[in-house]
Amino acid sequence: MASGNSVQGLAATPSHDPFFRVATASAFTHDLLAGLAAGRHAAIRVPGFLPRERCEEVLSALEERAFDSYGSTRVQPQVMRFGVGVSDHMADGGVADAYWKALEGHRAAWKGLGLSFDPFLVCREGLGADWPGGVEVGRRGGRELGDGVAREPNQGFLVHFDDALREYAGELLDTPLIGQFAFNLYLAVPPSGGETVLWRHRWRPEDEAHRRPASYGYDETVVRGTESLEISPRVGEALLIDPRWFHAVRPSRGGRRIALGFAVGLTSSGRLLTWA
Ligand SMILES: O=C(O)CCC(=O)C(=O)O
Ligand SMILES: [Fe+2]
């Protein structure tokens, strides 16, 4: 062991992992993204990522529209969304044909909002501003996947993790991934509740004993006693997490919680690709 290795010293205070922390910054820098992939941070917050006027423009367009519900067997309590996500179209470890058909409606619906800018493009540009090669929407079988959804988990998200490696047989995208992130941009947050919680816990086989039947989520007993951190998102803020850490969203009180979201993959050639 090299001298100066601090892990032994930490054994005396095992309650905190110094790498399980949130980095707050004015932009997604190359170093921060690399640090998130490497496990030097659990999450990156960028307050004021999207200017307030732009948040308001998207929000007021969305507020006029009816949201759909995620599949009610898998997602309970109910989560609302505007746009199409691949998680509702999984079939035999792959992607059902219905996804590609639904994406046509998704594109028409977002276009129909009549926004002065493409919010998912702006999010990709901000995320990739300092990343060599920028950020692009991922492809499967040569076809572009969905670019993002607006999600409204007013009753919260159960404790869960996201990992395309485990959710799909083989690769989801045409390029293999060596890291994954989850991106959220908050358009509306409730006056209280709506916190995002991360636990320093990654899936292990015995966790399945805590899984809710047919659900994406787990009982909170699965993370009992585990170090956690809590984030109260602000309007206009972007949050990038490593979604293999178990995470949850607390129920909202007194207002809607609406965020634009997509998954981000780091490919073996160092590209950042998104999907929803
Ligand atoms: O809305 C959030 O803060 C996190 C939602 C979530 O589970 C995810 O982005 O993977
Ligand atoms: Fe998640």
Image (tube, rainbow, N blue to C red):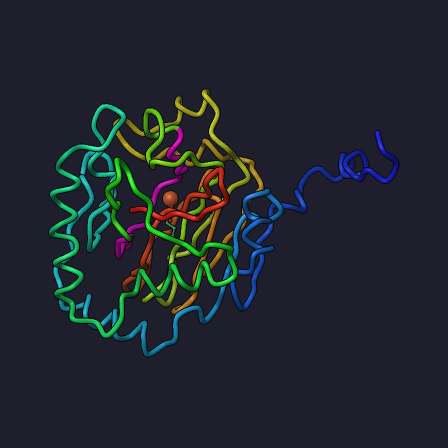
Q: Nearer the viewer, residue 38 or 253?
A: 38
Say above or below: 141 vs 154.
Answer: above
Say above or below: 188 vs 43.
Answer: below
Task: Please name the residue shown 86% across and 40% down the image.
Answer: 4
In magenta, the rendered stretch is 148-165
Q: Is residue 52 magenta?
A: no
Can residue 246 be seen here? The reply is no
Count of labels in the image: 0
Q: Is residue 13 left or right of residue 146?
A: right
Say above or below: 167 vs 139.
Answer: above
Task: Please name the residue shown 45% across and 58% down the image.
Answer: 128
Q: Is residue 147 left or right of residue 159?
A: left
Say above or below: 91 vs 60.
Answer: above
Q: Nearer the viewer, residue 243 or 152?
A: 243
Residue at the bottom extreme, as displayed: 53
Q: Residue 243 appears at what percent x and percent y?
A: 44, 42
- Residue 142 occupies quadrant: top left
Residue at the right extreme, as displayed: 3
Image quadrant occupied by the N terminus: top right
- Residue 209 occupies quadrant: top left
Task: Please name the residue shown 16% across and 48% down the image.
Answer: 103
Q: Residue 119 appears at what percent x and percent y?
A: 30, 65
Can residue 179 be seen here? The reply is yes
Q: Is residue 217 left or right of residue 65?
A: right
Task: Please name the residue shown 34% across and 36% down the image.
Answer: 174
Q: Residue 77 appears at what percent x and percent y?
A: 25, 43
Q: Is residue 159 left or right of residue 144?
A: right
Q: Residue 242 appears at what percent x and percent y?
A: 48, 44
